[in-house]
Structure formats: structure tokens, C-alpha cells
Image (tube, rainbow, N blue to C red):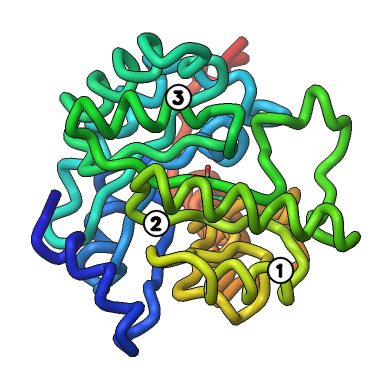
Amino acid sequence: MSSEGKDLVKVRDGGVPIAALTAYDYPTARLLDEAGTDLILTGDSLGMVVLGHEDTTHVTLEEMRHHTRAARRGVKRALFVSDLPYKTYETPEQAVDSARQLRADGADAVKLEGGADVAEQIRAIIADGIPVFGHLGMLPQHILEEGRYKKKGKSEAEAQHLLAEALLLDQLGVRGMVLESMFRRVAREITAAVSVPTIGIGAGHGCDGQILVTHDLIGAFPWFCPPFAKPKTDVAGATSQAVRDYIDDVRSTTTVTSGAATSLR
Ligand code: KIV
């Protein structure tokens, strides 16, 4: 793990909150790294914002490996984490095998979704010497069972369950945990209870840091943006405008020689 990455734990001693973002390719990873992002994640959100799938359950380990290698080339300074995709950590053995592959591709740590249901997998990966980040709350890889994306921790029972899961992850030795789409009081309670940094997404401002899908931050995926993400720029709009200008330029400056204007199809 990079030395900066190890320093993430300092946030617990009153340090600077963690600013984390996703990257799936070299130029984005390099831009994020050079701008000072603390943690860069090649997330399996890849499936939706890059590969055009409905949800993250279609992402394969091969696809994660390909994009992990590309993003890794752009990260010199930040902690670099990669997601274990859907059904690649069903058993401790499979989890270790998958984590080793992402590690070989340059991930400083791997992230996986769940608590007690994946405790043996987390234990095995850590025992193999690979740092792990947990992920609790709304779990995108569970969309097929749950049917919709729902904010977690509304009832006291659900809040207590999430807290117990977070304490378990902490006890297992994760380096940190993502808390996704949960009621802010629950995320705050978890953050106060665990010894490692919590990184929130749609979980309020009481975590040790925040993570966003970069496309949501820069307005690069205009067809869907979660309500908690406030785009800071409009890359999609700028791209569409540049493309329209280019089309106009081509059409107004290119002379078509007779006979060449046949259909492209
Ligand atoms: O896949 C992903 O991008 C993630 C973040 C949203 C935390 O897991």
C-alpha cells in the first residue's frame, strides 16, 4: 500500500477528511491523482457509467482487471482500491483468488460488499496479505434480490443491524468502509463506533470522508444522477456542444467531390 494510503487512518485523530472518487481509465485517474484525491476507486459502477449496463451485476472480473490496470497507470500518489465484482467472492478461496488478480493489476486494496455474509471471505483475503475495504448500507450488487435501491437504516432494528455489521468489519481488520445510502444518524453512529475511517456516499456529512462516482461529480452521465450528488460541472453538455460544433465545422468546410457523397451505410 502506498505510504499516503496508510495515512488515511490519521483522519481518525482529527486529520483532514478523505476525499475519494472513482476512475476507470488512465486520464481520469491521473487527473484525480494530480488534483489531490486521497483515495481512487475503480468501482464496479464501471458497469453502469462506462459499460452501459442496467446495474453492477453484469461486471466481470476480467472487465475489472482491464480497467484496474488502466486506472493504476494514472495513480502515483493516492490510495488505489479496486472492487471485487458480483459473484467473484462466493467462497473464501474464490475471494482470495479474485483479490490476488486485482492486486496483481496494481490495486493497493480491494473492496467488497457485505458484512457477516462475507466475513470468512474478508478474513481469508486479509490473511493472504491483501488490504480490504468494506461496503455497507445500500449494496448495489444486491439489486436483483432487493428489486430497488433503498436507503438503509430507517428502523431501529435496521440501524442496529448496520452498526453490528460495521463493528464486525472493524474487528475483521478492514482498512476502512464505504457507507452507502443510509440515514445520516446511522452513519454518524457507525463512524463514532469503529476504529477505521468511514467513507460515505449518500450517508450525510458525519463520515470521515466522502466518495462519489466521478461521472456524477462532473456531469458526465446525464441520463441518471443520484439526488445526493451535486454535479460541479457539465461535461456531458460541453461534450454535446463540442460535437455539434465539430459536425457544423465539417459540414461547412469540407468540399465533397462528386460521386463521394454516397451513404455510409
Ligand atoms: O462501484 C462504486 O463506484 C462504488 C462507490 C459508489 C462507492 O462502490
Residue at the (55%, 39%) spot, across then down: 45
Which one is nearer the viewer's eye here, 38 or 232? Answer: 38
Q: Which secondary structure lies at badge 1?
A: helix
Quadrant in the picture for the C terminus = top right
Residue at the (52%, 47%) spot, across then down: 168
Q: Which secondary structure lies at badge 2?
A: strand
Q: Position of residue 83 (x, y in %)?
A: 42, 35
Q: Is residue 145 left or right of residue 188?
A: right
User: In this figure, what is the number of numbered marks?
Assistant: 3
- Residue 215 in view, yes or no: yes
Residue at the (25%, 19%) spot, across then down: 101
* Labelled disc at residue 120: 3
Q: Position of residue 143 (x, y in %)?
A: 77, 31
* Labelled disc at residue 42: none
Q: Compare marks 1 and 2 and give the one earlier in the sequence.
A: 2
Give me the C-alpha separation between circle 3 and circle 2: 17 Å
Give me the C-alpha separation between circle 1 and circle 2: 16 Å
Q: Which residue is mark 1?
A: 186
Q: Are marks 3 and 1 in contact (CB under 8 Å)?
A: no
Whether 122 is drawn above or below 19: the answer is above
The image quadrant that residue 107 belongs to is top left
- Residue 244 in view, yes or no: no
Q: Which residue is mark 2?
A: 176
The amino acid beneath tag 3 is Glu
Whether 253 is drawn above or below 48: the answer is below
Q: Judge the density around disc 3: few (<14), some (14-19), many (≥20) Cα neighbours within 10 Å.
A: some
The amino acid beneath tag 1 is Val
Which one is nearer the viewer's eye here, 148 or 96? Answer: 96
Q: Judge the density around disc 1: few (<14), some (14-19), many (≥20) Cα neighbours within 10 Å.
A: many
The image quadrant that residue 110 belongs to is top left
CB of mark 2 near ligand 1 (< 8 Å):
no
